[in-house]
Structures are given as structure tokens and as C-alpha cells.
Image: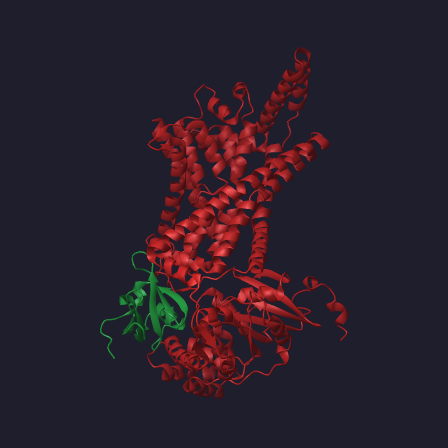
Amino acid sequence: MEINGNTLATLKRGEKGIIRFVDAADPQVQRLMVLGLVEGAEVEHASSAIGGDPMEFRLFGCGISLRQEHAKYFKVSPVAAGD
Amino acid sequence: MTKRSEIRIPANEIPFAKRSDASIAVVGNPNSGKSTLFNRLTGLKQRIGNYPGVTVERHIGLLKVDDKVIELVDLPGTHSLSAHSLEEHIAVDVIFGRMQGMQKPDGILVVLDATNLYQGLFLVQQLIDLKLPMVVALTMTDAAERSGVGIDIERLRQALGGVPIYPIVATTGAGLPQLRLAIADMPSLVPTERIVVWPELTEAARELSHDAREPLRFAELERLLIDGPIDANREFLEKLGGNARGKLEAVRDSLFGIEPPIAKDARIRYAWVRKVLAEVQHSAPPFYSWRVQIAAFINRPVPGTIGLFLVMAIVFQAVFAWATPIMDLIDAGAAVLGASVTQALGEGAFSSLIADGIIAGVGSVVIFLPQILILFLFIILLEDSGYLARAAYLMDRAMRSVGLSGQSIIPMISSFACAVPGIMATRVIPNRRDRIATIMAAPFMTCSARLPVYALLIAAFVPARQVGFMNLQGLVLFGLYLFGIVAGILTALLIRKTALRGPKPSFALMLPEFRRPNLQTVFIQLLGRAKVFLYRAGTVIFTVAVIVWALAYFPRSESIAPAVERQQTIAAYTLSGEELAAEYQRIENVAAAAQMEQSWLGRAGHFVEPAFAPLGWDWRVSSAVIAGFPAREVVIAVLGTVYAVGDEANEGTLSGRLKASTWPDGRKVFTLPMVIGLLIFYACCLQCAATLAVIRRETNSWRWPVFAWLYMTSIGYLGALLAFQLGSA
């Protein structure tokens, strides 16, 4: 399992990743975890607003938007397209 | 069965919560189709109120099945029983039966969105722990199939410990009859067993319960363990008693270690959810519908943003262009009605109260309705289709640069029609600081009541010169709009940097798929909001219209009526026909102006003239401005009366009269610097009692409306002072 420096913030549009580690110290990150962004969840970077922030992710069929400043707390391992 | 005769009463006349056989809470994620289902089940038999002390709406409806009347409470959407926002706190409080004035629900109707089982099951699993009778309504199964998700309902039922599940399509009504029967039978339903997804938590709860003073339900212990001894759990803490309370921290420590409890809870429960999903969901080939294609296109940053501006332009166009003919009609209708009342009742205090006070007052409320209804219709359509969240998402970065968040954009845009619905729309903003900053910025947006004053002054005093490809008059109007926006944004920024300094608000926004709004739901919501507007703003506007009328009407002068009669008699000797009628009218105008000058309003105008003199205003302008403080739209009417006066009346139209108006020493009153100052004053000043009332209501304190009024009035005064003094120097 390779994580390197990949986080939700570095996923390109259309790319998928599986969340491997969440730095949960920030209460706002905990809130995102309640919305389902937890270890093991597969997410796809669906779109972003102009300037790349905030970003929209697809998570088991639901859309969820978060700011880059929070996206960086979610380490992901990329999933090859077509998986 | 003696109740039978009572139940024949139309359901909407039954006192709520008194004669219902059971009270069922409708619980679900935000955007799960909960409100659509609620409206489907209860129709118009519902009541909108507020939860005590807060501005969260309470929707209660009645469902009649055979001889049973079931009360349904539509709770605010929530993701978890660990409440985060005010709305979630309310939902959780009602579910646990700790909401003041509300009994514990007899059962729970869970609304589960088939397109979003992931978040839905996270909540359902926590709700099962409550051990209350429970029925699941599985909505949007059609949409799930379209997007390629099939659900094995039998397996889902098993995974949830046997909870009855009813698939329904709320838009067509399929599955509703069965659901109704299930709801009616819910009180006799035996709750299913808890699903143990987290054995350590169950163990910790058991340990804690050994020392508890009073027995606690598992769900209550669970809240204490996960959320800790927070204020909302006060009641549970008391039940726990001293011994166990001391133990709580130790038990929590060994359960969570250094991991934040909410994070650990989410990790474990979502792992369970994923396991269930793998069992019950199977992918089917998706229909590649036009919706998916459109969504994929507008989700790209640039088309998405252009699309948003297009949508805003359409809303604007609709609010201003479509409403105008209806508003003109209402205006003309009120005038005709007023005139015919005066004719029928003759002159006098009573007929004036009816015609100039009450009819004009009701008219000034009703005239806003077309705009407000169109605005509300668009907001509801945008909300129900899921676009509102997307608008907030697209505008977040821009709004963040001024210290707000994306959710402030719709309240701001609404305020261009009227600040009242704009401020009401701030409810979608979860962060309180953000919400108040938006409320303070909203009244600066150029509302439709400011437009007539702008139009009058600009047409009269700004030359219609071409400047580039634009007209100077148009440019000034545009400048005033821009001025309002900039002033509003600076205000929000200022407030966020000073009084409401605080951490940046979180921005975790669910972005629902586009879905077609249900017409019945849209209609019910529109009706509800129109009622709220009429009740909140309408009563205020009407009251101030009558008060302003009284201030301008009283005291009556003893000497004016005989003087009018004398002059009219003299005129009748020398003139005849149309000339006589015109002279009669002139004499009456002059008399009205004289009456106005010695009325309370005119006296007030004279009284404050020294305060407004540095701005270049005489007593007439001052009176009009004072009359405009409760409701700025009356200013034109007051100016019309005041200026039907003396030599200046030759000019006919109001703008002519304004131009000809002079100080006693012959200087013009309306110079360009004075007019610019007056425009600035209007752009800033919070001359609207309805807005103040709504700010009071929405912030739940007098502090903010008082602050807004003082702040905006000071800025208006200083702006006008600066413009006049610098311009005249």
C-alpha cells in the first residue's frame, strides 16, 4: 500500500482514491468523518469550483464538498481508473 | 371508541398534540426526501411554528388512517445523533424527548434515501439503539435504479435486525398506502433488537449502568460516552448520579484513549455500513440519462460558474420584470379603491383613516407580494432541486475572501428584492457568526422599495447625458447598486473582524444530485413562507402605515377648512368649468400641504431641521425622511403632499416641484451635492421597521437590530454630510 504525500487535496479531477488515514484532531475534520469520510472509503474527485477550491468528492453516490485546507488531512492511496 | 365522533371534525381543527393517538418523529438525513414525504403524508393538514427560543421551524402534520389520528413531526435533517449544528441539536433533543413542551415520540419514521444509503444507514443504525418502534421509508428507489444501484430490500431488512422497510416513490405516490397503514400501527410495533457494531461500546455502557442512580437507556449511555458530559446531556448525567459520573471519564478514557470519540465512532460505524452495503447493494447498468450528462457538464468549474450567473440573472429578471405589471395593477387598484371610499364617505377623519391609512397600508403590504412570491418560488425550486447547495459551493471562495461563506450568497441575492426574505433565508447558514454578518450586510442591498426614490431623484437631477455607451442616469443607478453591495460586504468584513471574530466556519456541504422538485411540496412550502412573510412583515408594514397616516393627519388645523371654503367661493365668482376644477384642486393641494406642515409630522420636520440642515435639507425633506424611517416606500407619497405648495406648485409634476423648491432666501434646496447626499442616505439608512423586526426575530435579541439601525443611520448621515459639504464648498 503506497500513500506517499497523496491527500484528497492532491487528487486530480476524475481520479479515485481510498482514504487510508485521517488526521482527526481538528473538530471540522471530525465533522467530515461523521459525513462518511473515514478510512476505507473510496472517493472520487468529481469537480471543483474556479481556482480548485472548494472541491467536490463523490462518496458512495453522494456528493460532498470541502475546502482544500481540510482536504489535506485525508491521506489517500490512488485507485487506478477502471477499477 | 367514544372518540369516533370527535374524529369527524376536520383534521385541521383538531388541537395539535391533544387528540392524536400517537406522535411519530420523521427523521432522516438532509435532502433524503424527508419533507417531500412528510408533505405527501400530511398534505395541508400541517402547522408551521418555531421551536422554543430558536428560529428553527417546527413542522407538525396530521395523518388520518381509518379512525386513528397520528401526529407527524418533521424534524430537521440530521446525519448523526452526535449533533453538530443547531438544527441537529433540535432533532436529537426531540428524538430523546428532552425538547421543552414536546413529549417523547411514540415511534420513529426513518426516511432512507436509496441513492445515499451510505450516510443513511449510519443514522439508521444509531436510531435502532433507541429501541423505539421504527419504520423505514426507503425513498428514491427509482432514482437509485437510474443511477445503477439495485437494493435487495429483504437483505437490508435482515441487516437492520428486521425493521420493516417500505420502498416508496414520493413523487408518484407508489408505496404510500402501505406506509400509511404501517405508521398507524407503529405504536404497537415491538422495537427490534440492537445491532452490536461496537462490542466495546456496549461493554462500556453496561459498566457505567451498574452504578447509575436511575436506569438509563442504552442510547442515552451511548450519548454520554461519545459526546461526553456536554450541556445537552445534562438530564442523562443527573440520572447517572454522583458515583457513575465520577467513573464516566475513566470509562471514556479506556474506551477512546487519545482518539477523538466522534472520529472513532464514525470509523467503526461506517466500517459496518460498508459491510452492509456490500451485501445489499448490487450495481445494475445505469441509464445514461440527460440528467447525468447535464450534471457532468455543469459540474465543470467554468461552465458551472457561468451557469450560476445565468440562474441568478433569470431570478433577477423574474423578480423585477414579471412582478411589475401585477404591482402596477395593485397600486392602481388601491388608488381607485381609496378614491371611491373618499367619495362615498366624504371628507373626514374616518374616511381618511380608511382611504389613506388602512387601504394605503394594506396596499403597501400587498404590493410586495408578487415580488416576494416569485422570489420564494425560485428559492424553493433551487433548494428542492439541489441547486442551492451547488450555488453555495461555487461561490464559496469568492465569499470567503470577504469573511463569509458560500451559503451567504442566496440571502444576499434575495435582499435585492427585499431584505426580509433575504434575512429569513440566512437560516441555511449553520455558523452563527457568519449568519449574523450576513444579516447585517443584507439590508445594504438595494431593495425594491429604494428603487422609486432613486428613480425620482435621478430622473429629476441627473442629466441624461451619454457617457461612453451608457447613459449617465443609468450609470448613477448602477453606481448606487454597487455602492450597496460594497457597503454590505465591508460591513460583513468589519463585523467578522471585530465583534464576531472567530475561527473560520467549517464548510462541509452535501451536494445532492439534481432532482425534479415535487409540485405539491413546492406549493405547500410557498404557502407557508408567504404566510410567514405576511405575518412577520405584513403586520409591521401595515401598522407603521397607519401610524404615519395618523402623524400626518393630526392635529387638524382649525383655520384651514374655513380658508379653503373662502378661497373656493372667491374662485367660483371668477372662474368656471375646467379652470374652476383645476383651481379647486390647487386650493386643496395647498390646504393639504398647509395641514401637513402643522401636523405632528410637519412639526417633527421643523424640529429636526437644524440636525439635517448641514446635509442641505429643509423641513419638507426632513419630514419625508422622518416619515420614511418606519417604511422607506412612503417617502414619495409624503413628498407629493408636502410639495403641493405655494409658487412652486406651478411646475406640476413632483420632480418639477422639487427642482423649483427654494430656501426662504431664494437658494435652491435641491442642488446636485444635496441630491447625491440624499441618495447616499437612502442607500445606507435602515428605514424599514419590517427588516428590524425580522432581524430581532432571527437573531433572537434586540442588540443586533439596534446596532444595525444606529450603524446604518450614522453611515447614511455621514455620507450625506460629506457629499453636501464637499460638493457645496
The picture places residue B34, in percent across and down from the top left corner, at: 53, 67
Q: Number of marks in the image?
A: 0
Which chain is displayed in green in the rendered image?
A: A
The N terminus of chain B, quarter of image: bottom right
The picture places residue B215, in percent across and down from the top left corner, at: 54, 84
Task: Pick the residue in front: B419 or B115.
Answer: B115
Q: Going by the picture, which residue comes out furthest to the top? A: B574
User: Looking at the image, which residue is at 44% across and 26% down?
Assistant: B670
B392 displayed left or right of B374: left
Task: Pick the residue in front: B52 or B301.
Answer: B301
Which color scheme did the rendering employ for the protein? by chain
The C terminus of chain B, quarter of image: top left
The picture places residue B422, in percent across and down from the top left corner, at: 48, 51
B171 displayed left or right of B64: left
| Residue B422 is at least partly visible in this image | yes
The picture places residue B139, in percent across and down from the top left corner, at: 52, 70
B30 displayed left or right of A81: right
Up/down of B287 relative to B655, above or below: below
Up/down of B282 relative to B408, above or below: below
Up/down of B333 relative to A80, above or below: above
- Drawn colour of chain B? red
* Displayed quadrant of residue B252: bottom left
| Residue B546 is at least partly visible in this image | no
* Displayed quadrant of residue B613: top left
Task: Pick the residue in front: B158 or B541.
Answer: B158
